[in-house]
Amino acid sequence: MFLEKLYWCSYCAKQAKNLHEFLKVDEVPARIFCCEECALSFYSPLIGHIKEEEKKVRAELALRESNLEGRHFEASLVEDAMASADEQWFFNFNDFDKIHFFLKKQNNYFMLVAGITVENEVAMILHVTATQSEALIKHFKQTQQKKSEQFSREDESMLQNQLAPELMDKIGNKKSVLLATLLENRSEEDIPFEQYHHYDDFLMQTLQEPEELYEYVDDENDRIMVFIKNFAKGTGAFFYLAICLKDESTGKGMALPILAFPTVDGNLIQLYKQGEKHFSPVLN
């Protein structure tokens, strides 16, 4: 074959014909690394940025040094903080890098771990810190995504009312088409259909606080909105998608859910990122 598949490290350009020879630490398909050293070198600006921001906040808060600051933690403590975190959240640092924060309250201090999650696993730890200062933790928690105005509690109550029969039929027909597309493209290793109902509680939060929102016109000339949000679960993560019909009849452009589902497949997510990117988180 004239052109065969070829992969190369995103940092040192080492080449290989098999993707399994590389370390993948990002959902971006082309971002792979041949070893942990190259991955750390690539992410060194981000690692340094987080470290410097914490240093500035500590100076502003006039935090005195203690036996916690700068302490080297055993790997088991870090793993425990991620596995049994009291709080978890994500922050889109830019269009590609999504940081996964884990916060664990120990006996008399907080432990915070920041890393990158890929395919439901923590692929790389970027930063670990500990403090007794709730003020410092508050600064870190400012990275939690702000709510979108695209979906409100008023909209939630309206969805509970009976929709017009013709609108229900339209939603039903579109759901059949979207479901067929999902069946055709989903991976066998993805979250099983029979477990989807365990994720129903994530629908409203996805509609109210999307990390990404796309809007496009389908073949029937209807406007479709795709809400995407990443959630933490244990030491891993999953995406939740809500595909909605934009109902112009209310005068508000209310989003009516057609199909919603969880997935751990980053490639499947790319299929639904089409049209205009309507909403994107910004750096706080």
Image: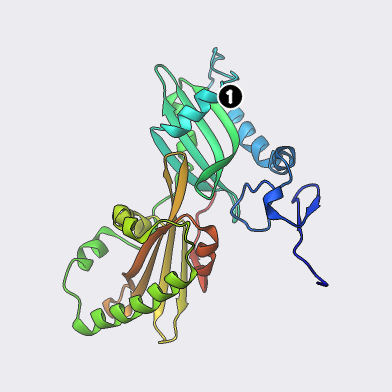
Q: Residue at x 48, y 56 (%)?
A: 189
- The image quadrant that residue 172 belongs to is bottom left
Q: Residue furthest left?
A: 162
Q: Is residue 54 left or right of residue 37?
A: left
Q: Residue at x 39, y 55 (%)?
A: 209
Picture coordinates of residue 138, whole percent (x, y): 44, 33
Rate crowding at label 1 as few (under 14), some (14 to 19) or many (20 or more) other CA atoms within 10 Å.
few
174 or 280: nearer the viewer: 174
Picture coordinates of residue 7, whole percent (x, y): 75, 57
Q: Which amino acid lies under the numbered mark 1 shown in the image of this protein? A: Ala
Picture coordinates of residue 168, whole percent (x, y): 24, 79
Whether residue 233 is situated above or below residue 219 in the rendered picture? above
Whether residue 108 is situated above or below residue 47 in the rendered picture? above
Q: Is residue 259 visible?
A: yes
Residue beneath disc 1:
59
Picture coordinates of residue 100, whole percent (x, y): 51, 42
Image quadrant in which the N terminus is located: bottom right
Whether residue 245 is situated above or below residue 91 in the rendered picture? below
Q: Residue at x 27, y 76 (%)?
A: 250
